[in-house]
Image (cartoon, grey):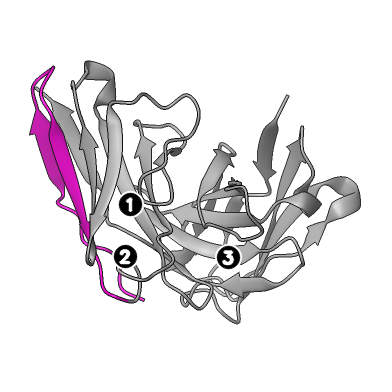
Amino acid sequence: EVQLVETGGGLVQPGGSLTLSCAVSGFSISSNYMTWIRQAPGKGLEWVAIIYVGGHRFYGDSVQGRFTIPRDNSKDTLYLQMTSLRPEDTAVYYCARGGSSGDYYAHWYFDLWGRGTLVTVSS
Amino acid sequence: QSALTQPPSASGSPGQSVTISCSGTSNDVGNSHNYVSWYQQHPGKVPKVMIYDVTKRPSGVPGRFAGSKSGNTASLTISGLQAEDEADYYCSAYGGDNNLVFGGGTKLTVL
């Protein structure tokens, strides 16, 4: 079965750190661009980070310098390492697979999503 | 990068057509990449891509869903509205320089 399963969410104090995991099955993360997208409670979607097939990584302005998006191809697992967490980082974090468009390029759409994991930053 | 602008709400009766707009700038919606996507999200559910590359429908998405773009504004049109179409809809656009911007979302009500 093709799926993504996020784990690692929870309650963390402001200034703290947390690492999310996204274990995939049914496809290889090394062959797909992958992303993290978050959704604050009752709010809209916000792009967080992306990792390309070649390994290049890019981040949204609000998390630049605080979050990183490594992956372990041997485990088919994507991660989101979060540091210096703020209350405004409270959200459900989704990992998602980049969709294929038949060419070499990432078309920045996401065709398979996990169910998400909730991160709450609060004292 | 500023969020794309969507109307907070839209509505239509079963069988009617409804169009949701997504307004951006020449740096995102209006750029030459044409990487505009639309996502449907039912309450408590995971987002689902309905349109990508402005006009393309993934396999399994009904033909009632159509995307378009004119200048800096993209649109999602749902024809033959059905009760199951009631959901939140989000647009997204590649902003160049390896970043993505989303719209604030539109809550679609089927009357």
Mark 2 closeness class: few <14, some 14–19, many ≥20 residues within 10 Å: many
Per the image, the residue denoted by label 2 is B29
Is residue B17 something that shows in the picture?
yes
Residue contact between numbered discs 1 and 2, judged by CB atoms under 8 Å: yes
Q: Secondary structure at mark 2?
A: loop
Q: Main secondary structure of the magenta part?
A: loop
- Which chain hosts label 3? A
| Start-end of magenta stretch | B1-26
- First in residue order: circle 1 vs circle 2: 2
Q: What amino acid type is highlighted by mark number 3?
A: Ala
Q: Which residue is mark 3?
A: A49
Instruction: Report the Cα–Cα distance between label 1 and label 2.
Output: 10 Å
Q: Residue at x 60, y 77 (%)?
A: A66
Chain letter of the residue beneath label 1 in the structure image: B
Q: Where is mark 1, residue-wise?
A: B91
Q: Distance from label 1 to label 3 (Cα)?
A: 17 Å
Type of the residue with mark 1? Cys
Residue B17: percent from the left, percent from the top?
A: 13, 29
Q: Is residue A38 left or right of residue B15?
A: right
**Where in the figure is residue A102, as x and y percent of width and height?**
62, 47
Decide which of A54, B107 is in the foreground and name it.
A54
Q: Residue at x 68, y 49 (%)?
A: A8
Query: On the same chain: label 1 and label 3?
Result: no
x and y percentages locating residue B11 in the rendered image? 10, 33
